[in-house]
Amino acid sequence: MKKLHYFLGTILLSGSLLLSSCDSSQQSASENNQDSVVVAGEQGTNNDLEDDTSSAADRVMFAVMSTRMQTEISRIAEQKASSQALKDLSRAVIDTNEMIIARIQDLAEATETQIPDALNTDQQEVIDSLQQLQPQEFDKAYLEVLARDQRQLIDNLQQLNADAENPITRGLVEDIADMQQPQLERIQSMQDEIM
């Protein structure tokens, strides 16, 4: 149980870094690139982008990093989950997220956002923490992280859609959100069963 609390604390800490990391990455990129393309180096995960002044690039960056994180922890769940139902859920998350990543790459092009090729340090710490948990602790922690991240991602996409003026951007965001919502519902249903 202590590991679970430590893990969730790590998630919250890493989450608090996302918005400030996005903003500092954007400022750095703007200074180094006259085209104002956001270059992400260090991005946190599992954080609310509650600040209405977050740019489209910040929100796209959150979406890609969040989706990659979900995919990585779902790969761990395929191996470590204690039930076949949870392993099946993790496979479904991976499959859906592969389609979502392709749409997010289109969204990144539409918003002129450059996305990183790899997970950041904070995300790797979360992955490492998950890998250390015993199967029963893992199941609960995985579902908590996944559900929270999915809700934040959907909220982030809704805000991006509300702020978008470009119809192409709106269409891409709506496609991604439409794929995310049923996935969140399935995660929450599984969470209710396990917890």
Image (cartoon, rainbow, N blue to C red):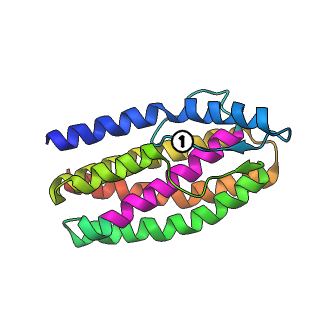
> What residue does disc 1 label?
43
Using the rendered view, name the quadrant where residue 31 is placed.
top right
- Where 27 sits versus 172, above or below? above
At 54% from the left and 68% from the top, the residue drawn is 98
Q: Is residue 151 left or right of residue 86?
A: right
Q: Position of residue 143 (x, y in %)?
A: 31, 53
Q: Is residue 148 left or right of residue 83?
A: right
Q: Is residue 50 left or right of residue 88?
A: right
Question: Is residue 20 visible in the rendered structure shown here?
Answer: yes
Near mark 1 (Cα within 10 A), the count class, few <14, some 14-19 or many ≥20, is many
- Where 6 sits versus 92, above or below? above
Q: Position of residue 119 (x, y in %)?
A: 50, 53
At 86% from the left and 38% from the top, the residue drawn is 34
- Magenta stretch secondary structure, dominant: helix
At 43% from the left and 65% from the top, the residue drawn is 93
Q: Position of residue 88 (x, y in %)?
A: 33, 72
Q: Is residue 136 magenta?
A: no
The magenta span reads: 56-76
Q: Label 1 amino acid?
A: Gln
- Where 87 sits versus 44, above or below? below
- Where 65 sits versus 179, above or below? above
